[in-house]
Amino acid sequence: MLIQARGISKSYGPVAALGPLDLDIPAGSVGLVGPNGAGKTTMLRLILGLVRPDAGSVRVLGVDTSTHPLQVRAQVGYMPEHECLIPGMTGVGFVSYMGRLSGLSASTALSRAHDVLQFVGFREERYRRISEYSMGMRQRVKLAQAIVHDPPLCLLDEPTAGLDPQGREEMLGLLRELTKRTGKSLLLSTHILSDVEGICDHLLVLDGGRTLAQGPIKDLLSLGDSSLVVRVKGDPSRFLAALVSRGIRAERTGPEIRLARPPGGEREVFEIARETKSQVRHLGRSLQSVEDLFLELVRKNGNSAGPGGPGP
Amino acid sequence: MTIATPRYALSDASTRPRIERVWTIFAENTRLRGLRVGPLLLVGFGFTATFVPLLLSEMLASYGLFGAPELSTFYEAYQSPMLLIFAMLMSAVVGAGIVADDLRTKAISLYLSRPLTVMDYLVGKSGVVAVLLALLAILPGVLTAVIVGLLGYVPADVAATAALVFLGVGTLTVLTFTGVAVLLSTLTDRKSFAGAGIFAFLFSIEIVSLILASATGDLSFEYLSPWEDILAVARLGFQYPSFLPTIDGYVALTVLLALIPTLFLLSYVRLSRLEVVTD
């Protein structure tokens, strides 16, 4: 396991930020999603060993973060969400500096800085001052500094935040390349659920400091095979009543009706529609995307607050 | 955009020891902050303002002017307000942004997500301020003592003692001013606030302590001012005969030895409590 947590909890004064919870995050690309205040930041802080858990322990790559935080940080690359670059430095100077702070010699750090900047698409602009960089370039420098020391695990906090659609696609392309070609593990904390879908094969959903779901995205989405979502033209209340009268578990959520898959499958749904003189406009699995899954989990958790800003 | 996989692997390189990473912080920040017009001018003017008058007075003393060439004449360096003024300016100009800039740009989150402790960061950053202050508070005195000793203006043993006293008192000066600058720099993410705070703190505490001591006739108020403590220790070290009542050098030394670790401890506690990962 890449990250293993047992019974961890963390509070800030009277506010419980996280847990208690257990986690088993395998190697690969993992999406960490949750509404604001879900505990994602605290989770990253715990993984980096910047805070000690009130109870329990976190092991990253087999190393306890509380007792050996420096050993953990040497193996982890971190790309923060917020601005964190040093404006007076050049791109290559900055990335090389970060490499040296991770323990590389000056010559190795410089050589690797050039390599990773090449990887993120920098040419001559690497010699310009960071203060002259665009938002997209800054994000790419942030990624470069996170991988300059070749860590097996990268923590990426909102890597596509503030990027235009083209920049976002480029960043996602880099992350895909990073996982596929170099075999690095990524823990991607984001609000943009489609980013997770495009890159990650494992998902961890937090809400209110608790784990709502964790596991391979395919498995989590397949849980939705047993339920359907229907949109009808006509009288949805009558259609819903007919479903319930046949013993089918169903509920109305906005313009849609969610129902447990009937014994007769989709055919039975059409029969009920015909009987109630409703027209089926949409019929499908209730969970088709990570966004569906996320919304469903948050809804079930009784939390009305959605994600801070789910993307397209 | 070019997408090419980096060629390296971690096993290519061995990880350098932690002390080297601290040195990297120090060296890179000295280059970034020290090699600029403001600090360079301050070093130039500050060094000259202390070194030249001290050297001249020692040379003239050897000819029987301004007293005999003895240890106490080296106290001249501390009688002029130049050292205090330039040390305060250097603390404010360089020290103010040493941590505050990292708080503003949030670069501190990158430092602390590396295999570094808060103490490593603090030592690396404080070293930058300390070295620049040492160019004002230690180098002129030690250099003067060495030069006048080598040229024979002052007996060699006196010159050697003077150099050692300059080193000791200068080190106390450097650590005190660095401690104040770094602490105030950790308290805000605005360099200008920190700079004004450093200047105001050091200057106002000096004025206030002197006024209180004068108004009440109780000299112990002067122990409140780090600069008065430094002067008292310097008087003790240079065996300077003061004809006016002054504070005790040993007590002043004790005050400074308590103040310096307190300043750095407070900076450490402040940085340890920062929320550094995300907003």
Image (cartoon, rainbow, N blue to C red):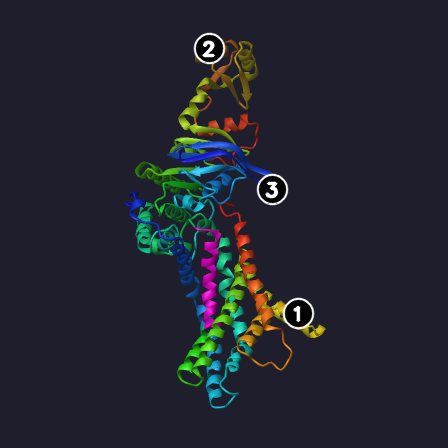
Residue pointed to by mark 1: B221
The magenta-colored residue range is B116-138
Q: Secondary structure at mark 3?
A: loop
Label drawn at residue A263: 2
Main SS class of the magenta portion in the image: helix
Q: Is residue A209 above or below residue B21?
A: above
Q: CA distance from mark 3 to mark 1?
A: 40 Å
Q: Are marks 3 and 1 on the same chain?
A: no
What quarter of the picture does the N terminus of chain B occupy?
Answer: top left
- The structure residue drawn at horizontal position 40% and vertical position 37%, both measured from the top left corner, is A62
Q: Residues within 10 Å of mark 3 (few under 14, many from 20)?
A: few
- Is residue B137 located in the magenta-colored stretch of the structure? yes
Q: Residue A59: x and y, percent?
A: 44, 38
| Residue B232 appears in the figure | yes
Q: Viewer-nearest of labels 3 and 1?
A: 1
Badge 3: chain ID: A
Q: Viewer-nearest of labels 3 and 2?
A: 3
Q: Identify the mark nearer the N-term, 3 or 2.
A: 3
Label drawn at residue A13: 3
Q: CA distance from mark 1 to mark 2?
A: 90 Å
Asked whether the beta carbons under mark 3 and mark 1 sit within 8 Å of each other, the answer is no
Q: Secondary structure at mark 2?
A: loop
Residue at far right of view: B216
Q: Residues within 10 Å of mark 1 (few under 14, many from 20)?
A: some
Q: CA distance from mark 3 to mark 2?
A: 51 Å
